[in-house]
Image (tube, rainbow, N blue to C red):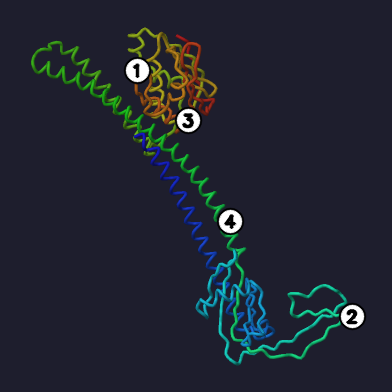
Amino acid sequence: MCKIRYRIALLIGGTVLVLLLIIMAVFHLNIRKQIAEQADACLKNADSFSMNPDEAFAVNVTPMLYNPEQILIAEDETENVFTQKERDLIEWCSNQPKDQTLLAELNGSIYYIYRKDCDQSHNLTVSYTIEVSSSDESAEGDPFQMIFDDSESITDAFTPKEVQIRQIISYVDVTGELDMIRRINLMFIIAASVIGMFGTVAGYILGKKLEQNQLVQKQFFENTSHELKTPLTAIRGYAEGISQGVITDYVQTGKVLTEQTDKMRCLIEDILCMAKLESGTVQLRKEEIGLPGFLQDCLMPFEGTVLNRGLDVSLELQPMTVSADPDQLEHALTNLLTNAMKYAKTGIGISCGKGIIRIQNDCDPLSDDELAHLFDRFYTGRGGNTGIGLSIARDYILLHGWHIAAERTENGICFVIRCAPNNTKNKKESAAKPK
């Protein structure tokens, strides 16, 4: 049984974590797919119009996520001038298939690359613009810049020249996007772990409550079985004694059998009432009830108990009328009176007025734990007593929309019922004097 809390904790925490990781994986794959599709579309589109950029801008009206860069490889090697990054890309592409969008990771950067060979009709017209300046700065590394000792800046255009293009490599850098995705994934994993941990804790607490509930039910049914077994054993013993002719005092035997069967009947009725309350099939049939007379009627069946135990009963009943189901209210009040008399030392007190019903006795002091769980179903108190009567009484009171609580007094315990009184002028009852 002690493993239930761990199983539920692992089940809830693991389920939450797995679901969040699945969501993260779907998000990751979908974003990567979108990036790949956008990169592939813009690379192929860039290649289609690489020979005439003005025409490309005129025809391609679909917005693209990326602006691809291109490496134009001329047939004449003397015309090829590349940066280090371009040389690395060309070297990587030399061992890769053509006419495909490929993913490459070079020098810490990630690219989508598309390479295509060109036929002889792909010519590029190149014109050189030279900036002439009076600066003495070096033009090293820039093949298109020349420095002159002239005080004025001039621009001169060389004669345009056609260059035969052998191959075009288009590429886009997606390093930033993929790095962002990795960061999002990391944050998602951390969040999923934290949420999964909270789910595990919640599952542990839930499992612990289930364990406690199972333990309480187990104790209840064990005690109930014992309480049913006791009268059955007595009835069986008297029945065997009568059948064997050992018992001759049939009047006393009849009284004992009646008491034992009444005890069994009450316990079975409580169990049936509890089942009805749990199923929600109990329906209230309310009517106007004058509480002073109703409380005295509920007290009448206990006259024998009061006389036998010599209990003092104090009544302070003020005129008070409520709308309630008489059967259910009688059941609740009877259970409360039964409990009060069972544990009373010398007497009980009953009062009503101003929307409040009080039933108190002078029982032994209860601990804080016993007081907190007094109305809990299946709760076992001191001495192994397992009464469900108080739980049923509370459920019937709550079903009326009222409130019930147990409060400590100087001499014992007091059950306090706060109901909505319906005072009427035509239904006033005289206050009963304390006995």
Nearer-the-camera pick, 317 or 174: 174
Which is closer to the viewer, label 1 or label 4? Answer: 4
Q: CA distance from mark 3 to mark 4?
A: 65 Å
Mark 2 sits on what residue? 150
Which is closer to the viewer, label 3 or label 2? Answer: 2
Q: In the structure shown, which secondary structural element does the residue marked by tag 3 occupy?
A: strand
Residue 68: quadrant of the picture: bottom right
Counting residues from the start of the chain, the first of labels 3 and 1 encountered is 3
Q: Residue sitting at 45 percent across and 18 percent down?
A: 367
Nearer-the-camera pick, 352 or 190: 190
Q: CA distance from mark 3 to mark 1?
A: 38 Å
Counting residues from the start of the chain, the first of labels 1 and 4 encountered is 4
When the figure is inspected, residue 255 is found, relative to residue 63, above or below; the finding is above
Query: Is 279 displayed left or right of 158 in the figure?
Result: left
Residue 183, disc: 4
Please name the amino acid that badge 4 sits on.
Arg
When the figure is inspected, residue 54 is found, relative to residue 338, above or below; the finding is below
Mark 2, other Cα within 10 Å: few <14 / some 14–19 / many ≥20: few
Which is closer to the viewer, label 3 or label 4? Answer: 4
Mark 3 sits on what residue? 323
Please name the amino acid that badge 2 sits on.
Asp
Query: Is 341 displayed left or right of 122 in the figure?
Result: left
Q: In the structure shown, which secondary structural element does the residue marked by tag 2 occupy?
A: loop
When the figure is inspected, residue 49 is found, relative to residue 30, above or below; the finding is below
When the figure is inspected, residue 242 is found, relative to residue 110, above or below; the finding is above
